[in-house]
């Protein structure tokens, strides 16, 4: 069965060109000319890949990506744009975009990226299928489950190994030794991708109910009525589609842990019901009459500033104080660069085990470069970058050439400023000049290795040489704009 691809672009010529070109490659193509149309199609059809323009009338490409992720839809997304600034690229990547392609592009480049994205997804799906735990409960949208880690403690060990998380490790040790048990709720705050779920799983490991289940639900991914049913369950006939009685997470968790991710997105009415559950440790199924006991620990997480949400009337003050019996603030990765080596080693080791590879981690020089990049997408961004490298490159050792240029740009102020200039170039200079700067920048980052630079740029070595001749640069040592200014 051929892969299904959704093309989204408001420019009819580009849309038609991509549809024709990718159809010839054997893919099944669906086209949309607006973000609204695209989202409507994702609700009724399943796609293996979405290729979307960034700037669209109405719903933008970023908003399409955000909507898909909020629906727990992990379909890979390739972004196209003529507004290729670094900030936008980072925003797309931190939300989980597979790649970012500046316009204009060659159809051959797009075909190559499409093949790579579909291959990466195929490998990831295979790995997920092999490693997925078997649970008796039918999986629900936006809900993930994991078997109890018991005394294994791998998440706790990982936290203890990171110097930047030492204060959190001490808090967790105190929680684990406390006699308060599962009555103590925990609120975890931090930026997106900072590792809040890892902290939540560590809480589960040190809890008395660690041999029961860890159940996670994203509060932003479901409408309030469906979220209520997922949490508390429902009785048969309690609403139109309630054909049978259903147990909610508070029943299924037993004495385990319920992780409420993105708690700041929960509706006010449901917040009131959650507050009563936390205070009384009892609940009723939707449409039910009998009170049931809550035995699980509740861990909530948010990337919002809940105090601001309280002031705006979007979050209950009493629920906030009931959740933050223990409050944990997870620092962003940029504030703990000393943890980077430990995290890289962990993710590489995990990928080696899953993919039967023997990739060696980064050396000291490359590690120093990576430590100077701010990692706006935090641990999630690092994990996704490494996973992509391992899947597509299968390297013997991680090298600088494997990492996107915008990440390596952080290791040198001159490179960073030049890369920032590239991000603003569309409004300041012709596209040909943007291309020139990108080529010279890539050559700098690869120590003038033309083969590596051409591979990163997606062009042939001969095309690179021709462009360098057009720029009237010495092909052996291309001179950057900064160098010219200094001369």
Image (tube, rainbow, N blue to C red):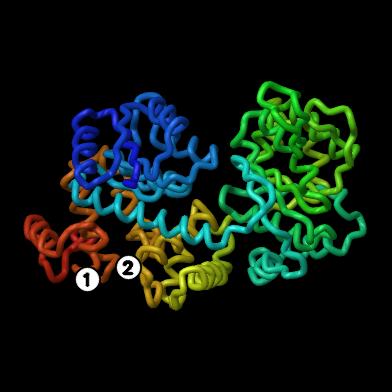
Q: Quadrant of the image for the C terminus?
A: bottom left
Query: Pointer 1: what residue?
Result: 449
- Write down the quadrant of residue 389 in the picture: bottom left
Q: Tell me residue 119's x, y (percent).
A: 36, 56
Q: Of label 1 and label 2, which has the lower sequence position?
A: 2
**Residue depicted at 80% across the width and 30% down the height:** 273
Q: Tell me residue 83's x, y (percent).
A: 30, 39
Considering depth in this image, is 11 or 338 the residue closer to the camera?
11
Q: Does 486 appear above or below 421?
A: below
Spatial CA distance of label 1 from label 2 is: 10 Å
Q: Tell me residue 340's x, y (percent).
A: 54, 67
- Write down the quadrant of residue 442 in the picture: bottom left
**In the visual, does 352 lie left or right of 186?**
left
C-beta proximity under 8 Å, tags 1 and 2: yes
**Residue depicted at 19% across the width and 46% down the height:** 107
**In the visual, does 140 lie left or right of 258?**
left
**Residue depicted at 32% across the width and 68% down the height:** 401
Considering depth in this image, is 386 or 39 the residue closer to the camera?
39
**In the visual, does 354 lie left or right of 150?**
left
Query: Pointer 2: what residue?
Result: 401
Considering depth in this image, is 337 or 361 the residue closer to the camera?
361
For disc 1, the neighbor class at 10 Å (few under 14, some 14 to 19, many from 20) is some
Q: What element carries label 1?
A: loop
Q: What element carries label 2?
A: helix
Q: Is residue 302 visible?
A: no
| Residue 182 image label | none
**In the visual, does 56 lie left or right of 325?**
left
Q: Does 310 appear above or below 400?
A: above
Q: Does 237 appear above or below 284?
A: above
Q: Does 350 appear above or below 482?
A: below
For disc 2, the neighbor class at 10 Å (few under 14, some 14 to 19, many from 20) is some
């Amino acid at each position: 069965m051929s892969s299904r691809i959704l093309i989204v672009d408001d420019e009819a010529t580009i849309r038609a060109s991509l549809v024709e070109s990718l159809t010839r490659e054997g893919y099944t193509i669906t086209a949309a000319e607006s973000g609204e149309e695209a989202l409507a199609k994702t609700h009724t059809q399943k796609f293996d890949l979405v290729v979307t323009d960034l700037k669209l009338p109405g719903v933008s490409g970023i908003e399409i990506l955000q909507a898909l992720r909020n629906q727990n839809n992990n379909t890979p997304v390739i972004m196209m744009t003529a507004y290729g600034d670094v900030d936008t690229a980072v925003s797309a990547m931190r939300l989980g975009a597979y790649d970012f392609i500046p316009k204009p592009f060659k159809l051959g480049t797009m075909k190559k990226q499409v093949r790579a994205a579909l291959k990466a997804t195929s490998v990831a799906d295979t790995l997920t299928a092999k490693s997925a735990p078997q649970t008796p409960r039918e999986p629900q949208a936006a809900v993930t489950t994991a078997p109890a880690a018991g005394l294994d403690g791998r998440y706790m060990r990982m936290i203890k190994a990171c110097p930047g998380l030492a204060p959190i490790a001490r808090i967790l040790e105190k929680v684990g030794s406390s006699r308060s048990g599962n009555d103590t709720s925990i609120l975890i705050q931090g930026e997106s991708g900072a590792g809040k779920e890892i902290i939540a799983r560590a809480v589960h490991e040190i809890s008395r109910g660690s041999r029961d289940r860890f159940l996670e639900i994203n509060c932003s991914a479901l409408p309030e009525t469906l979220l209520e049913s997922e949490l508390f369950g429902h009785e048969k006939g309690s609403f139109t589609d309630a054909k049978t009685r259903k147990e909610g997470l508070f029943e299924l968790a037993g004495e385990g842990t319920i992780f409420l991710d993105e708690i700041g997105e929960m509706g006010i009415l449901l917040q009131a019901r959650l507050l009563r559950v936390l205070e009384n440790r009892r609940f009723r199924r939707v449409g039910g009459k009998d009170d049931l006991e809550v035995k699980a620990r509740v861990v909530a997480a948010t990337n919002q500033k809940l105090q601001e949400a309280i002031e705006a009337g979007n979050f209950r003050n009493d629920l906030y104080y009931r959740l933050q019996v223990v409050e944990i603030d997870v620092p962003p990765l940029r504030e703990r660069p000393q943890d980077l080596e430990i995290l890289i080693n962990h993710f590489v080791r995990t990928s080696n085990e899953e993919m039967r590879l023997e990739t060696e981690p980064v050396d000291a020089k490359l590690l120093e470069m990576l430590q100077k990049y701010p990692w706006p997408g935090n641990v999630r961004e690092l994990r996704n970058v490494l996973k992509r490298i391992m899947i597509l490159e299968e390297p013997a050792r991680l090298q600088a050439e494997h990492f996107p240029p915008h990440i390596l740009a952080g290791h040198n102020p001159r490179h960073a400023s030049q890369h920032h200039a590239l991000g603003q170039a569309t409004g300041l200079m012709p596209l040909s000049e943007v291309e020139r700067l990108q080529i010279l920048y890539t050559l700098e980052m690869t120590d003038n290795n033309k083969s590596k630079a051409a591979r990163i740029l997606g062009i042939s070595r001969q095309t690179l040489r021709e462009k360098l001749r057009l720029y009237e640069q010495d092909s052996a040592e291309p001179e950057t704009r900064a160098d010219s200014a200094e001369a």
